[in-house]
Amino acid sequence: SQQGEEDPQALSIQEGENATMNCSYKTSINNLQWYRQNSGRGLVHLILIRSNEREKHSGRLRVTLDTSKKSSSLLITASRAADTASYFCAFTGGGNKLTFGTGTQLKVEL
Amino acid sequence: SAVISQKPSRDICQRGTSLTIQCQVDSQVTMMFWYRQQPGQSLTLIATANQGSEATYESGFVIDKFPISRPNLTFSTLTVSNMSPEDSSIYLCSVVWALNTEAFFGQGTRLTVV
């Protein structure tokens, strides 16, 4: 399967701590995107990083991409209870079809 | 940003019946896709909805089971035909405005087949 792998599968932290989740893939990519999903609803787009980029920031989010290792990480700093959700990486090769990772369930406790 | 409206948001259906899910975007989009998320799983691409022509299906998905229409650049439908309990999933439409840019998703349709 060409599906991306994410780790950890589940992560539980205290509010104010940082959360890091990792994504690995096997193919060449054009871009890699991160999404959040709350309670099985629709996906919220968080950030896109292109294959020629190494790092991007958006608010409390930092994404890195290492194409030599075929891996990406998402860091959420100073987490809040509202960050509790499932997080998915997804990547494209040619075209815009997305292949998703397996997902990380993040729980932020008060 | 554009609004992606997906209907219905949820439904409970009898096995053997069919359900049509609608995806409406408030601006013209280049590409539209349909994904399935089985319970507790990640998302899998069903097909690319092509405007004015037959959809392009991924391995494991066939037109007879998941007929798709896209009559214009803002609207698409996915039908889940002859449903069985194994079709219970969340179905999501996704749109992209330009190559190598962000994909945005509708709120999903949670389908339960009994």
Image (cartoon, coloured by chain):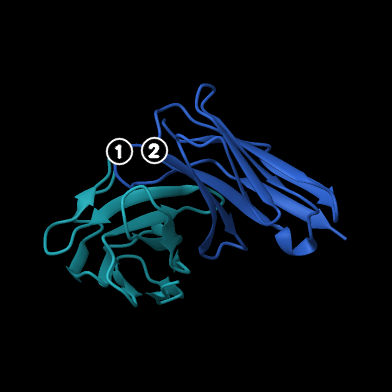
Chain colours: A blue, B cyan
Q: How many residues crowd mark 2 within 10 Å: few (<14), some (14–19), many (20+)?
A: some
Where disc 1 sits, the SS reads loop
Tell me the quarter of the image containing the C terminus of chain A.
Answer: bottom right
Q: Which amino acid, mark 2?
A: Asn
Q: What chain does badge 1 belong to?
A: A
Q: Which mark is residue A30?
A: 2
Q: Residue at x 46, y 75 (%)?
A: B9
Q: Earlier in the sequence, mark 1 or mark 2?
A: 2
Which x, y percent locates residue A17? Answer: 84, 49
Q: Are marks 1 and 2 in contact (CB under 8 Å)?
A: yes
Q: Which amino acid, mark 1?
A: Gly
**A84 relative position to A16: left or right:** left
Q: Residue at x 54, y 65 (%)?
A: A41
Q: Residue at x 39, y 46 (%)?
A: A98
Q: What chain does badge 2 belong to?
A: A
Where disc 2 sits, the SS reads loop
Taking the image as drawn, is residue A25 in sight?
Answer: yes
Taking the image as drawn, is residue B80 in sight?
Answer: no
Which residue is labeled 1 in the image? A94
Which x, y percent locates residue A86? Answer: 63, 53
Q: Nearer the viewer, residue B73 or A57?
A: A57
Q: Nearer the viewer, residue B30 or A42?
A: B30
Residue A8's place in the image compared with B15, above or below, is above
Tell me the quarter of the image containing the N terminus of chain A.
Answer: top left
Outermost left residue: B53
Q: How many residues crowd mark 1 within 10 Å: few (<14), some (14–19), many (20+)?
A: few
Q: Quadrant of residue B81?
A: bottom left
